[in-house]
């Protein structure tokens, strides 16, 4: 990969990750303020759809899910399918069936995407594994939506549990956005640390000089 294509790949990954993180943040804000939900939720789903599409394409390099087109399509569905909840409302006879189909479509796509990201090994650390939490949450939510709550010991409807997906998505998005930029971040941090130490040393040297001068004056 040339330096130019590598730069494009890092920029695309950063933008896609930032949009995924923005989606998680907006969902969290919607949970904190239900009155803002009509504005935040559509924006969150659009941000995730665009971010997932960018990550699937992987301009200038390999996608975060590798070279498999099946996994790339799963990543796009993972981002785009939630738009169905916001943009389409089926008539009453079909609303439950359509809603459940959309839930399971998102769940399957999320699981495939999380596994593909982990297996591809393109990402590292939280960027590679945090999406697994989103996948587990999707599976649990789909199961709880498909059966009577009274038949399961787990009640997955509290606000705290509803925040699992957006928090994990926020962490994953930030990690993906910073992927490939850690060397530059560490280099800049090291440069700032060196500059701060030099400033401190200069200050210390000035203080010692002033102390010596005071001693001379006292004599």
Image (tube, rainbow, N blue to C red):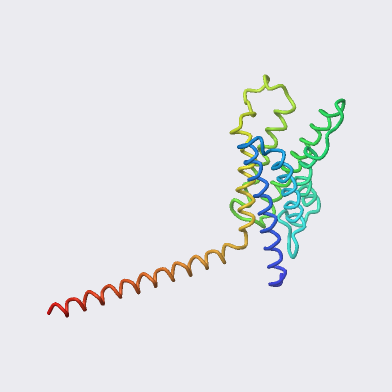
Q: Furthest-top residue in view?
A: 150
Spot occupied by residue 107 in the image (x, y as percentages of width and height): 74, 38
Q: Residue at x 71, y 72 (%)?
A: 2
Spot occupied by residue 158 in the image (x, y as percentages of width and height): 61, 29
Q: Residue at x 62, y 44 (%)?
A: 168
Q: Is residue 85 left or right of residue 120?
A: right
Q: Looking at the picture, does residue 78 appear above or below residue 198?
A: above
Query: If the image is split into quadrants, where does the C terminus sit?
Result: bottom left
**Residue 206 found in image quarter:** bottom left
Q: Is residue 34 left or right of residue 46?
A: left
Spot occupied by residue 71 in the image (x, y as percentages of width and height): 77, 50
**Residue 66 found in image quarter:** bottom right
Q: Furthest-front residue in view?
A: 35
Spot occupied by residue 119 in the image (x, y as percentages of width and height): 68, 51
Q: Furthest-left residue in view?
A: 219
| Numbered circles on residues, count | 0
Query: If the image is split into quadrants, where does the N terminus sit?
Result: bottom right
Q: Looking at the picture, does residue 55 appear above or below residue 204?
A: above
């Amino acid at each position: 990969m040339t330096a130019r294509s590598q730069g494009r790949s890092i920029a695309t990954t950063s933008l896609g990750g930032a949009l995924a993180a923005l989606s998680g943040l907006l969902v969290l804000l919607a949970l904190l303020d239900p009155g803002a939900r009509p504005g935040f939720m559509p924006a969150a789903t659009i941000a995730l759809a665009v971010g997932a599409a960018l990550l699937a394409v992987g301009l200038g390099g390999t996608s975060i899910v590798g070279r498999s087109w099946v996994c790339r399509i799963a990543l796009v569905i993972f981002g785009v399918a939630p738009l169905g909840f916001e943009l389409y409302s089926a008539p009453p006879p079909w609303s439950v069936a359509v809603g459940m189909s959309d839930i399971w479509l998102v769940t399957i796509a999320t699981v495939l995407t999380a596994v593909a990201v982990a297996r591809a090994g393109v990402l590292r650390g939280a960027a590679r594994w945090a999406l697994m939490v989103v996948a587990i949450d999707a599976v649990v939510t789909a199961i709880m939506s498909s059966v009577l709550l009274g038949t399961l010991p787990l009640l997955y409807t509290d606000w705290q549990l509803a925040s699992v997906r957006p928090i994990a998505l926020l962490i994953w998005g930030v990690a993906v956005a910073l992927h490939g930029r850690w060397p530059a971040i560490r280099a800049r941090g090291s440069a700032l640390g060196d500059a701060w130490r030099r400033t401190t040393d200069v200050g210390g040297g000035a203080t010692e000089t002033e102390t010596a001068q005071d001693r001379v004056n006292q004599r």
